[in-house]
Amino acid sequence: MEGSWGLDYFTHHRRIGGNVDARISPEGYRLLSNSEGGAKMPNYEILIEDMQLLLDQENQENEEYQRKWHSIKAQASRKTKRSGLDLNDAAGDNENANVSASLQHSREWITGSVVEYLIYQLLVGTDTRVARYLKKYTFHIIPIMNPDGFIITQTTDRLHRKNAQPEGDCLGTDINRNWNFHWNETSSDASSTDPCAYNYRGPKAFSTPEATNIARYLKSLPNVASYMDFHSYAQLLLTPYGYTSVPPANYDSYLKPLADGAVKALKAVHGTHFQAGDIYHTIYPASGSSIDYAMGEANVSVPFGFELRDTGLFGFILPADQIIPSGQETWAPLYFYSRQLEDLNMINTEF
């Protein structure tokens, strides 16, 4: 199907007979409609009639924001191998680390905006609980895990997912299939050996400087209480593992109840429904992810993966007016699981 019609998959099926979201060119759509290309036309629904129209609208909004806020500058501190762009992080000196990261997949712009909202709440927000957060935790925040890929989405291909490493005639490796924990151990269509595929896993584990450097940073921290990796879209809260159908030993007793409580706290803000569960059963089998690595190699107490809004109406081109609501509903589970870790004596409280 992908070869005949030129589909660019945005999501994967979660069960046999389930739905997937994909982008298709006008020519590919004509082939699909005429049942050409040697395949039978599947049942389908058009969610976005003209993707380019959405992209043009987004570009216009971004230009308006740039004119309004042109004096705001970015500051960065951590180098990547390829282009010299920086991987940003902000950290304090508390012993219990709370690590949040976004834009590992460069087209998922809402994730960076939500993490920036979390930074804003920690620095200048009015939530009276912030003082408690800062007393118990150090927040390590990486707003852009994939700076090279993010530049591509801003300049040449808004829907580019991978980093910018050249791979023959193709560009990029899927960073979130490249982490060195059971790398290349699943055979699902969520990970590919084809360098031109959007989910290419790389020639070997940690072949990407982004995954390598962030993993090194994660393991350098003395006590990582939580690691949040933000993605979009699907409205899911994911726990390990993705590489195997067997969840962690504490899944039923601890991880799943914690995830269920977090999505309940999230829903209480704006009524947005998220589904909680392990990667393998909830979204698809996938090895080489940062979430699996965080639990299996970095000994993180709570590694979660967020798949933020929406469920396909706008997909990766989520309108700017959903940034603040998305940030608000993400802030709620952050407080919930931070408090739960303390109540369950999962962090050091002697300061």
Image (spheres, grey):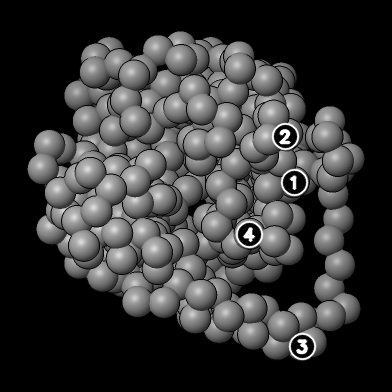
Residue 165 badge: 2
- The quadrant in which residue 268 appears is bottom left
Q: CA–CA distance between discs 3 and 2?
A: 34 Å
Q: What crowding class fits label 2: few (fewer than 14 Cα within 10 Å), some (14-19), or many (20 or more)?
A: many
Q: CA–CA distance between discs 2 and 4?
A: 15 Å
* Residue under pointer 3: 68
In the image, what residue type sits under mark 3? Answer: Lys
At a point 19% along the width and 56% down the height, the residue shown is 35
Which structural element holds mark 2? loop
First in sequence: mark 1 or mark 3?
3
> Viewer-proximal residue, 117 or 39?
39
Contact between marks 1 and 2 (CB within 8 A): the answer is yes
> Viewer-proximal residue, 53 or 327?
53
In the image, what residue type sits under mark 2? Answer: Gln
Which structural element holds mark 4? loop
Q: Could you say where residue 265 lies in the image, as x and y percent from the top left?
A: 30, 56
Q: Quadrant of the C terminus?
A: top right
